Amino acid sequence: MSTISKITKEHYEWRSQIIKLAKADIVKTYSGSALGWAWAIVKPTITILVFWFAFSIGLRMGGKVEGYPFILWLIAGLVPWFFMNEIIVQGARSIRKYKYLVTKMKFPVSTIPTFVSLAKLAVHLCLMVIVIVIFAVYGRLPGIYILQLPFYMLCMLLFFMAWSLFSAMLSSMSKDFLNLVKSVTTALFWLSGIMWDVHKIELEWLKQILLFNPITYVSSGYRNVFIYKTWFFEEPTALLCYCVSLAVMTILAIWSYRKLIREIPDVL
Amino acid sequence: MENVVIDFRDVSKVYKLYKNDQQRLLSVFSKKVSYKKKKAVDHVSFQVRRGEAVAIFGKNGAGKSTVLKMITGVAFPTEGTINVEGRVSALLELTSGFDPEFTGRENIYLKGRLSGLKEQEIKELEQEIVDFAEIGEYIDQPVRTYSSGMKARLGFAINVNIRPEILIVDEALSVGDVAFKDKCLEKVNEIMHKDGVTLLFVTHTTSMAQQFCSRGIVMKSGKIIFDDAIDPAIEAYEKSMRKK
């Protein structure tokens, strides 16, 4: 309990620094290359086009989904994955990346994963604006359902902030953990129902497992907004399962923080 | 006691040494993983009053840096209590908390903000720091392109100018040239007398410590073996060096 209040207090007292460091993190990620900011958009665009090409033209699976062109269905679920993919790896790297804040000055370590997450969120928001523009061009704006987009964003942010703290603590203890994380991200991508329709699964046990997968929850949530036009409260079981996952991840984050905070400066 | 700004009570610091990274990761989940203990600081107690200038001597590995790190608050003691009052500005090792990707100027702002200064205050100090560091055009280049001398100069310039209450200098002056060293000593003298800054100074150059420290602490394998006025401290340090 005292750990929670300590983390909360640190975040409150350093709130303006967190925002500034998040800005600095974005600048740092994109400065030093000629195209700079454009990379934030170029990279995802290429990935989307490659998947669209492979699935529609190569595998000829690109039929309409719920009456929507395949490409729209694809980006609705894939764009949140770009954020999750970044944060799974970069979140785990965050404390290692900002070593000097830990070993060279007194700085609240728990806020490092937070400002890294916020920096990634800013990029995600820019991409979402583009997604909405694309839907508008197709004349397929989601209407009133767009109101629940912030809800799913918050779900995504909360879970992955907890993940970042947990994983950053462990990967500062050992690089092995970081390598483990890197090697499972691709697997997570293909297993979490980003490239295939979760609604079409017939295996009951698999459905059950996926309910507890926050990646599936968020990705399907974004599609609920743009494609399926479903409110989040119409799927209470999924919401409940997500909350369970969030609680477990938060407990893990706090456990790892409490256990390792005093050791990290010695090993980094 | 009044005016005590640094208070160490029976402080020990033990580093856990694992065979490799895998063992260290495993130790998070299991208590069975074996490790060696290295006692870096061994039951150390001392107090420093406001405005004091203390030199800390000792061979490499005597525990000086660990003590400074604990004062700064970046390392935690295994046993004992530490009380530090006031804003600590620490120059731990050379690259003292720079972000290598940022330019020198951006690092001034970063460091200033993290030390709790307001944007306006940093703006006022900016020119002073740039002038003091004497790195010219390089101030707008990323710090990763700096030489070690430049890093040390900028680090020193920032740390003495952000109005610290406790200034910690860890061997940072050993790389600068004589002219810059003198300038630093002058500046340290100035802020000590004008603002009553407390100074903790780690060095191997006893003559430099003699110039502005009034007290000397000699450490040996994690213990304080001598703590008194500077001149006898230097004598004790030199004697312990000769003895091996």
Image (spheres, rainbow, N blue to C red):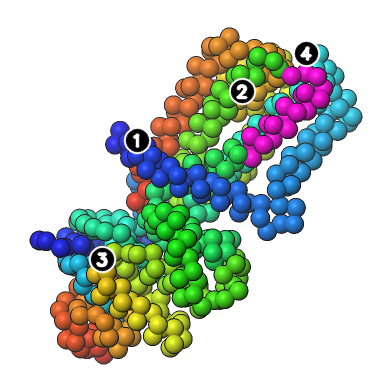
Q: Can residue A94 be spotted in the picture?
A: yes
Mark 1 and mark 2: span between their CA atoms?
Answer: 28 Å
In the picture, the disc for residue A149 is 2
> Mark 4 vs mark 1: same chain?
yes
Q: Label 2: how many residues lie within 10 Å, few (<14), some (14-19) or many (20+)?
A: some
Residue range in magenta is A123-141
Identity, as a three-letter code, of the amino acid under mark 4: Glu
List x then y, in percent, for residue B137.
Answer: 60, 74
What residue is shown at x 85% (from left), y 19% (from top)? Answer: A63
Identity, as a three-letter code, of the amino acid under mark 3: Val
Chain for disc number 1: A
Residue underneath mark 1? A4
Discs 3/1, front: 1
Q: Quarter of the image for the C terminus of chain A: give it.
A: bottom left
Residue underneath mark 3? B41
Number of marks = 4
Q: Label 1: how many residues lie within 10 Å, few (<14), some (14-19) or many (20+)?
A: some
Q: Secondary structure at mark 1?
A: helix
Q: Label 3: how many residues lie within 10 Å, few (<14), some (14-19) or many (20+)?
A: many
> Mark 4 vs mark 3: same chain?
no
What residue is shown at x 56% (from left), y 22% (from top)? Answer: A151
Residue in front for this viewpoint, B223 or B33 = B223
Discs 4/3, front: 4
Residue underneath mark 4? A66
Identity, as a three-letter code, of the amino acid under mark 1: Ile
